Image (cartoon, rainbow, N blue to C red):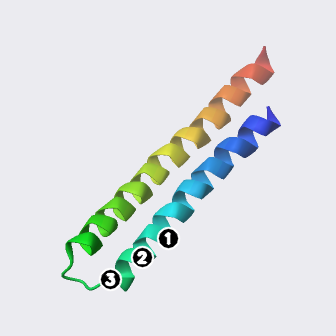
Amino acid sequence: MTTMRVASVSGVIALFAASLAIGWMADGLPTNSLRAERLHALSVSGKTLTLVVGIGVGFFWLFWDRSRKRH
């Protein structure tokens, strides 16, 4: 149980860190380059995915853990 919790939180943190790193790479490129635009879009998508997955993991552990403790 604890291992799954640590793994899921670590996965969300790793996804967010990767999104930040991609954003920083995009910021280092010239603003009018196609590569910078693609990296920026990938970074925003990754941050959005992090938010969705993070909320999902949080609600899953919050409600699933409570329901298992009752039985």
Question: Is residue 60 shown left or right of residue 28?
Answer: right
Quadrant in the picture for the N terminus? top right
In this picture, is 71 found above or below 1?
A: above
* Front residue of this view, candidates 65 and 20: 20
Q: Position of residue 60 (x, y in %)?
A: 60, 33
Task: Provide the residue designation for mark 2.
Answer: 25
Task: Provide the residue designation for mark 1.
Answer: 21
- Tell me which numbered mark, 1 or 3, is placed earlier along the sequence: 1
Query: The residue under label 2 is which amino acid type?
Result: Met
Please report the residue visible at 58 percent of the width from the left and 40 percent of the height from the top.
57
Which residue appears farthest toward the top when viewing the image?
71
Q: Are marks 3 and 2 in contact (CB under 8 Å)?
A: yes
Q: How many marks?
A: 3
Please report the residue visible at 66 percent of the width from the left and 48 percent of the height from the top.
9
Mark toward the viewer: 1 or 3: 3
User: Quick one: label 2, few (<14), some, or many (20+) residues within 10 Å?
Assistant: some
* Residue 39 occupies quadrant: bottom left
Please report the residue visible at 74 percent of the width from the left and 21 percent of the height from the top.
68
Spatial CA distance of label 1 from label 2 is: 6 Å
Spatial CA distance of label 3 from label 2 is: 7 Å
Question: Is residue 50 shown left or right of residue 67?
Answer: left
Q: Position of residue 31 (x, y in %)?
A: 24, 83
In this picture, is 51 found above or below 71?
A: below
User: Quick one: label 1, few (<14), some, or many (20+) residues within 10 Å?
Assistant: few
Q: Are marks 1 and 2 in contact (CB under 8 Å)?
A: yes
Spatial CA distance of label 1 from label 3 is: 13 Å
Task: Provide the residue designation for mark 3.
Answer: 29
